[in-house]
Amino acid sequence: MANKKISQLVGIGTSSTVSGTFLLPVGAGSSAGPYTTNKITTSELASYIFTGDSGGGGFPATNLSGQKDVYFNNPNWQDTTSAADGTNYAYLMVKATNGLLTTGSGIARPVGGDNLGNHTATQTLNMSDEIISNVGQTVNFQDGGNIGSSTAEISLEHPTKIKFDAPTIQLGVSDDVIASGSFSARSADFVGTITGASLEVQGASYHNVTDINASASAGSISVDWTNGNIQHQDISANTTFTFTAGTPKPGQTLTMYVENTQANFNDFRTVLFKSGSSTDKVLWSQQNDSLPHAQGTAVSSAGAGKCPGVSGSRTNVYTFIVMHEKIFASAVTGYNY
């Protein structure tokens, strides 16, 4: 075919089909001319549009645009899910069934601050030793949580206060709270054990006074020393006080003041103290053997000693020091109270 100008060629029409080895004429030459008419197949033209040629330096168009669906015809897709690192492999959303290019996170718009609120993690997030900053006021753990490090300490710092709001705070492998160095605790309901080489209290130290509040005429009254180290009871009858099993504890110092509500001084009431099933665990000084109103077996008779009773309209103060399996008792009697 003789060389012709492009304008002299006849179009194929919008309804014609281009396939197979359908040939197209193209003008070939430098940008300044002259041009010769060459033939090219539709496949060669498509390849040139998308890949260019070695002489032209690659893709000739500045962009690919339009409103048609774009398909990648590749029957063997490489699954790079485990290898995707953003450099050697990256994610591009393509339907595996037909190669349709679709949009999604990071494709529909440039990444300049991704909204992670609608993301659901399917595996552990590896921050690669990077820092998370500007966290909101609350971090919620779905099924409990753990913040830990196997290589260095974890520091919680705040210029005002760090608050732990939980019924139990565990430090270490148990519910015991271990503090090294100076320790300050303020709690209305503190229950626990403080141990160390020494314990210094600066300022006042005091115990609440627990009123046993049993009937004054009961005659037999239980005393639970876990209710307090200082307790009080009125009596109007001869009374036996029985310490609740498991109390008191070794090393504990206990005080009880007992008031006889009878108006007549000579209308005394006897008092006994028991720990367990008998009185022989509560030991009294031999000096009490000759006191009036004293009850029990005298030390001189190989007994635990006698407990002084309470005169009418008077108060006695009893002190108990618990050591080993015995309770060493003493009494100051006759207070006009």
Image: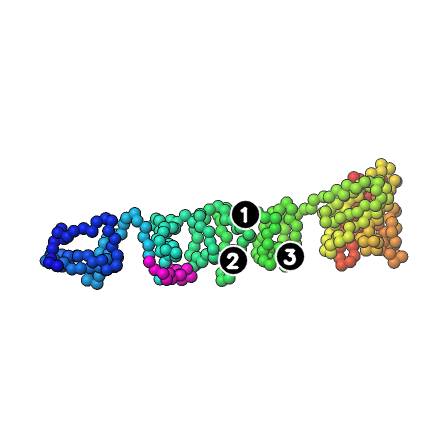
Say what secondary structure mark 3 lies in: loop
Say what secondary structure mark 1 lies in: loop
- What residue is shown with label 2? 148
Q: Which residues are magenta?
A: 73-86
Image location (x, y in percent) of residue 42: 23, 57
Instruction: State if disc 2 and disc 3 touch (CB < 8 Å).
Output: no
Q: Is residue 78 magenta?
A: yes
The CA span between labels 1 and 3 is 24 Å
Instruction: State if disc 3 and disc 1 touch (CB < 8 Å).
Output: no
Of the residues shown, which amino acid type is indicated by label 3? Thr
In the rendering, which numbered label is found on residue 163?
Answer: 1
Q: Is residue 335 visible?
A: no
Of the residues shown, which amino acid type is indicated by label 2? Gly
Residue found at the very far front of the displayed protein: 16
Image location (x, y in percent) of residue 33: 11, 57
CA neighbours of label 1 inside 10 A, class few (<14), some (14 to 19), many (20+): few
Image location (x, y in percent) of residue 203: 62, 47
- What residue is shown with label 3? 195
Relative depth, front residue between 236 and 67: 67
